[in-house]
Image: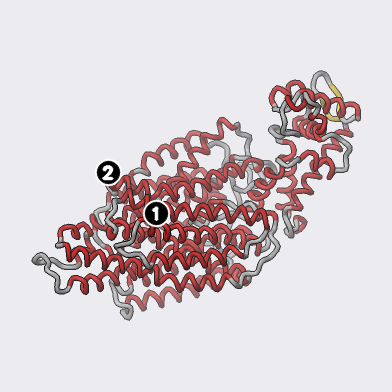
Amino acid sequence: MDPAAEPQGTEAGAAGPPEVTVQKLWVPISALLLAMLLAALDQTIVSTALPTIVSDLGGLEHLSWVVTAYMLASTAATPLWGKLGDMYGRKRFFQASIVIFLIGSALCGLSQNMGELIAFRALQGLGGGGLMVLSQAIVGDLVAPRDRGKYQGLFGAVFGVTSVLGPLLGGLFVDNLSWRWVFYVNLPVGAVALGVIATVLHGIEVRRKHTIDYLGTALIASVATCLVLMTSLGGTTWSWGSWQIIGLGVLGVVLLVAFVAVERAAAEPVLPLRLFRSRTFSLVAVISFVVGFAMFGALTYLPTFLQVVMQVSPTMSGIHMLPMVLGMLVTSIGSGQIVARTGHYRVFPIAGTAVTTVGLLLLSRLTENSSTTEMSLYFLVFGLGLGLVMQVLVLIVQNSVGYEDLGVATAGATFFRSIGASFGVSIFGTIFASGLNRRLEDALAGLPLPAGFRPEAVTADPRVIATLPPAAQSAIYHAYSESITSVFLYAVPVALAAFVLSLFIREEKLRSTVTAPDLSESIGLNPVERSSLDEIARALSVLGTRDARRDLFRRITAEAGLDLKPASSWLILHMHHQGGVEPAELAEHRVVPIQVIEEAAREVESRGLGVRNGLPLRLTEAGEEVALRLVAARRSQLAELLGDYDEKQYADLADLLTRLSSQLCSDPRDRPDRIGPEHVQHGEGRSF
């Protein structure tokens, strides 16, 4: 997605993305959106099917690993996919990631036991990480910076839509087909995306020099795996004092020490240790961890509560969870917009962690007798809290680091949320499984039960509950309820710690470049790796487009110190960009009144800035000087949006400003006005 990156065989910085018509562009963009849909949907669709999967395959104590295996694999693979695509071309690796994802999906659907499903989910996650990072990167190769914000916004919207659709589709498949279709559904969609990508993506191969931190990536993934294994297996498969659990803990610490040593020496570390010298980044990392911990822990176990305890269908469990997801979306998007308008952000992590803490406390009060209204209210509060803090954490990190760390710090904030999600799911799973076994034994003691019945039968297949006497059913539902809600109670102190930490976040003046958040960074899970230049290009293209709607040509004319009508400046920039224009033809293709264009042409000619050479109107030497002053004025305006990022220190940043200023000034779709011919008839066109 680097705007400075070029087609194969050219040097970086020489030109922009290839010219692609809007009609042709929507075909590859649609394929990229389909691929992103697969990866995003897989993070939410599986949770609704988990109770049914357990009923079919057994292994309740390992249920959390169905989610955790995917998260760990995709998180570890994301930076590798991004840099391999940079080095050798994105198309081939994007196709490879789709193939791996589809193979993993097919194998997941064919799984015959929990061990197979967990292993194939990890394979699926490897492909999912590539879908995340490369689909967004290819947009940057296809689309000029002028339009990049619009298309990137679509990818952010995909995350929001899948947050809602995932639980619903998961429930529909389980109710009407089989839980295996949660994975099989990826195959036709992925095949279409793969075919379109192979057919229509041409000439976008991008090369950048990188040194991939393979060892660092492997070590951080191993550290996370050891600690997640320890927390998920401790107290269930093995006792906490067993040599296996102690060994996993010791191995995790040793690998962490090795990781620190490797990162200090790495040319391009996967997680630069210098980031932790920033108090703000360190605080945000911890808070991000807690947000992931709470959000995905809840998303994984709430469907079990709804389907087993409340005895609703998988489809209805997805509907019951909508208040939480919608609350999360509303406050996530809303908080980002408020920060962009006011420049103040400190209140949101404080309020978000506080509301999340309250939400977890409310969830811990749910029982098998709770009403739908009560559950919906509690889910809504929890979702509102998560949304308040999710969006703003990325903004805070971007605002706290220098230009050289902007890309890795942005990915780092999401990385910690992803790791937190893995820990949350595994720790919640351990608390749930160990608590359930104990409570079932206590609840069923002394009750009349069928001959040969064992409590383990309930955890292996919850459908067994319906075959038991009413007294036993009631006792089991109560045991399930207490076991699930206790995990939320245990999460309350963690969320409270995040609230206390958020009080120490200092509010700094917000840079203009970070007031245009990317929804995929706030709602998505994977740490999509982009360079610092990628981040600046994305933000400036969004801000530049938004800024262009606010009287662009009037302001750049004034900035350049020229006594020209804005329409004349617009015409001069088109002539500069195209070499020459015919005003009548220009009017046919633009929503600009012919009267306005003709008046601008007369002013350009009368000032000696343009001359007709045959039909086209071309710039004179004086006109070229004026055009360069206008481009320089726009460049100056964009430079102001950088805040304290000094372009003089970074050649790539200076080059980006030069190219963006030219593209944002001379895009043939821009107009010097926003009115139609009916206004010109009343003389309003002269105001331009």
Q: Quadrant of the C terminus?
A: top right
The mark that comes first in sequence, 2 or 1, is: 2
Give how far across and how far down residue 47 sits, in percent.
36, 55
Left or right of 373: which side holds 664? right
Residue 216: tell me if it is visible: no
Q: Is residue 15 above or below residue 687?
A: below
Q: Quadrant of residue 677?
A: top right
The three-letter amino acid code for the residue at tag 1 is: Met
Q: Residue at point 22% right, 62% down?
A: 460
Disc ID at residue 177: 2
Give how far across and how far down residue 631 sits, in percent.
79, 41
Residue 336 or residue 365, whichever sits in front: 365
Disc ID at residue 321: 1
Q: Residues within 10 Å of mark 2 (few under 14, many from 20)?
A: few
Give me the C-alpha separation between circle 2 and circle 1.
Answer: 21 Å
Q: Residue at point 68% right, 44% down?
A: 546
Q: Quadrant of residue 490?
A: bottom left
Left or right of 667: which side holds 527? left
Callout 1: helix, strand or loop? loop
